[in-house]
Image (tube, rainbow, N blue to C red):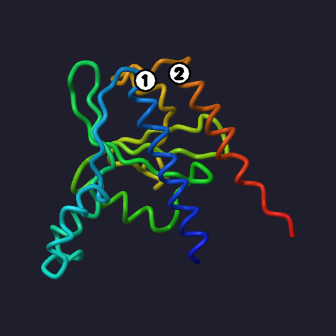
Amino acid sequence: MNQTNFAESMLKGRMAETLFEELMRQSGNVVYRFGYEVIVQNLAQLENKFDRYSEVGERIRAIPDFIVIDKKGKPVFVEVKFRWKPELHKSDYRMLEKINKFWSAKIIFLNCWEQPYFRVCDPPYLDKAKKLSLRPLLDETDWKIDKKIYTEYENLVHRYLTPTLIPPKK
């Protein structure tokens, strides 16, 4: 992956996280940023002593992006992933294994190929055929997502992320 693709991928990932975070907040849930990027800043002083590939390092690298607390006060770990299509990449199988092993987090897949753009997946994430077990985010009843607000966020994905599927002119 070249530097431009990396930057674009990172930007879309951050957009997906922000869209999810604000959708949850506007629907009345409490959202805390958690995630590797937040934690690793505090580990910078341990740089020489921190082994990313030890079990602790692997666990830290798999830290979910958010803790969402629903209206009843129940906390849930949540990882957010942007994908062009609601499909897995080859490297995702290992990621799913780590997240399930260390955190048992819900995973939100935000895609810009087909609606619903926001989909949720619960551990163990895959069905017997090794296909991702996705369901629409609106089916997540614990979070009581407001349908009107949800539609606004689907429209934001359509407006800002879906146009990026169009290849650049030569």
Disc 2 element: helix
Disc 1 element: helix
Q: Residue at x 43, y 23 (%)?
A: 26
The vertical placement of 53 against 30, above or below, is below
Amino acid marked by disc 2: Ile
The vertical placement of 112 against 42, above or below, is above
Q: Residue at x 72, y 54 (%)?
A: 165
Q: Quadrant of residue 117?
A: top right
Q: Is residue 100 left or right of residue 13?
A: left
Q: Residue at x 66, y 43 (%)?
A: 160
Relative image position of residue 60 (x, y in whole percent): 22, 62
Q: Earlier in the sequence, mark 2 or mark 1?
A: 1
Q: Which mark is residue 149?
A: 2
The vertical placement of 45 against 77, above or below, is below
Instruction: Name the residue beneath numbered marker 1.
Output: 26
Q: Is residue 48 left or right of residue 88?
A: left
Relative image position of residue 22 (x, y in whole percent): 44, 33
Q: Cβ–Cβ below 8 Å for labels 2 and 1? A: yes
Amino acid marked by disc 1: Gln
